[in-house]
Image (cartoon, rainbow, N blue to C red):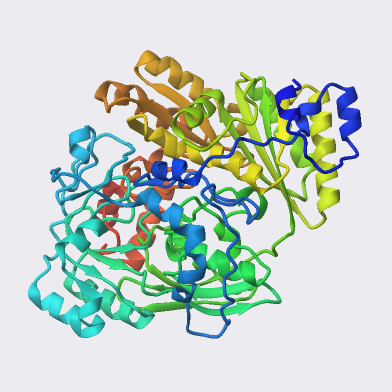
Amino acid sequence: MALPSLLSHSRTRPSVLREPLRQGGLRALLAPWDPPPVHPHDRAAEHACTPPSTESSSPGHHRPPPLNWIRVGGRTVSSGAGTSLTQYGSTNHTLTSHRRSYWTLCPQHPSSGPPARIATKEAQHRVKDPLEVQRRTFGSAAEPIQRNPDFSVLNSDDVSFFKSILGDNGVVQDKDRVAVANVDWMGKYKGASQLLLLPKSTNEVSKVLAYCDSRRLAVVPQGGNTGLVGGSVPVHDEVIVNLGGMDKIISFDNVNGILTCEAGCVLENLSTFVENEGFIMPLDLGAKGSCQIGGNISTNAGGLRFIRYGSLHGNVLGLEVVLANGTVLDMLTTLRKDNTGYDLKHLFVGSEGSLGIVTKVSILTPAKLPSTNVAFLSCNDYMSCQKLLLAARRSLGEIISAFEFMDRQCIDLAMTHLEGVHNPLPLSPYKFYVLIETTGSDESYDKAKLEAFLLRSMEDGLVADGVIAQDISQASNFWRIREGISEASVKVGAVYKYDLSIPVEKLYDIVEEMRSRVGDMAEVLGYGHLGDGNLHLNILSSKYSDDILAQIEPFVYEWTAGHRGSISAEHGLGLMKAEKIHYSKSPEAVQLMASIKKLLDPNSILNPYKVLPQSALSLEQGS
């Protein structure tokens, strides 16, 4: 209940609810929390060569990064066509540098591993070249994927043609550079491509795809390469087409908040730009310092702002897409309402580059609100978490912007493996923790509303203990705990990661059942976006084991399907789950998807072996 240790740091601004809370013995709820200072050099080492947490994100500019956070004022870029985001490099560096280091490839001793395979043992995660990802996560069992014999093999004439279109600088054959593009940031998937293409315009992408389609050269579109399911790296020798050079802002409507830009724009750079205009991006991810907006759209990325602003299906107004044969499909409207025929853009949102390559996007950005409050709470049981969510929707409906939950194992993990973080509730051995964020336009009204809601929740027994952040530093610490879970998990050793969408009332059941299945072989964590019904299920062990995997798969997919959930809430299918789509979609739906794939990409050159099972594609090819 009340925590005197937290009260000893009382420097909070006055609150009309403080006196009633004292009378009720609930002082800890509003007590400020002030951790001892940590020298920045003591925290820097933990971030080197550590993967990003794409399972979590930053819901607002009031929740800064934990390392030496400085609000850096970026120079406002004009909204005229052709504005390059590279102009943001100097102003945005301090804000993003620590995020980029999360997934830096670290030099290691040379090692080897078979291409075109999902690794199951630690040795199989190694990369052929001298670069190796230090931290790794793990997914499904090894399943060798045969190269499609219909695809051509790259030759010198192909390279010469690409150079004639892109110039020498746009055609990369250097082994070290291509090796980095061949492997995902986890070191879990590795292809054998020999060519990386860097187009600078839609016209160049069109010419590249038209040629590849005529030659039947397989292509893998690539953005920031921060995905978790192997969707952005080759499986065999596909040509890599990276859109990082297409990073221009085309226009910004500062009346309606509509941004139009190229697909290679880095999400964090876009966030900085629109914030300077008084708006925010509708999505925010832990990998925002590297992920690109085209990749975000192609995977229908989620994140913590989902509860407030919904999915990209609702925020993307228009797209420009290049089809497999080079046709440019111009759907780049900025209209909020357009009811003329089929809304084709939705085919490409979440298609993971298997139907076309997104080259431009227009997206609706919400207004930036000035008031943000963050509360860190504990609950005695999962039922209390559910009831608290319902109460929050009713009482905080118009200002709630995030509702995250973590079990005690997550908190213990973060406190053990993350430096520079502090438990806001150190004397609370409760089973569950909830982080609530509100965002609104009236600071005093929002704060009072949150305090009143939490007071009622404590009186009703839903909240056992909690604190409200009194400044940016405290809010940053709260979010650092939540966002650092994925980072901390890879420090244990082996991590089996699953991203599931499950009805909220059943969401934690699979965590408890998984604990019973793996017993002492592994530790099971459950956390995620409770407001969206999105569970991140992590199974941790000191090393990868086929015995552990046998207890996890296919049980995790069968259980999810049995409760009418989704085997991929926000990470996509990619290579990891392409053959498992039937757990979430009917055979008829899968076959219709295969028909659409054949219509738009008859030679199947776009991101082959991903998203859809080979059996469905083979059946469609034979029809």
Left or right: 29 with respect to 80?
A: right
Of the 4 image quadrants, the one containing the C terminus is: bottom left
In this picture, is 422 found above or below 570?
Answer: above
What is the total number of numbered labels drawn onto the structure image? 0
Query: Residue 492, how many percent across, how many down?
Result: 36, 29
Seen at 81% across and 52% down, the residue is 443
Where, by quadrant of the figure, is residue 298 drawn?
bottom left
Where, by quadrant of the figure, is residue 125 drawn?
top left
Q: Residue furthest left?
A: 156
Left or right: 289 with respect to 494?
A: right
Left or right: 91 with respect to 602?
A: right
Q: Is residue 287 among what the camera can see?
A: yes
Where, by quadrant of the figure, is residue 576 drawn?
top left
Seen at 60% across and 21% down, the residue is 431
Q: Is residue 339 among what the camera can see?
A: no
Query: Residue 206, how many percent across, how many down?
Result: 32, 78
Comparing 581 with 55, the one in front is 55
In this picture, is 235 found above or below 387?
Answer: below
In this picture, is 174 found above or below 34?
Answer: below
Query: Residue 390, how many percent across, how many down?
Result: 73, 35
Left or right: 14 with respect to 37?
A: right
Of the 4 image quadrants, the one containing the N terminus is: top right
Query: Residue 135, how many percent across, how many down?
Result: 32, 40
Comparing 297 with 135, the one in front is 135
Comparing 464 with 566, the one in front is 464
Seen at 58% across and 82% down, the residue is 78
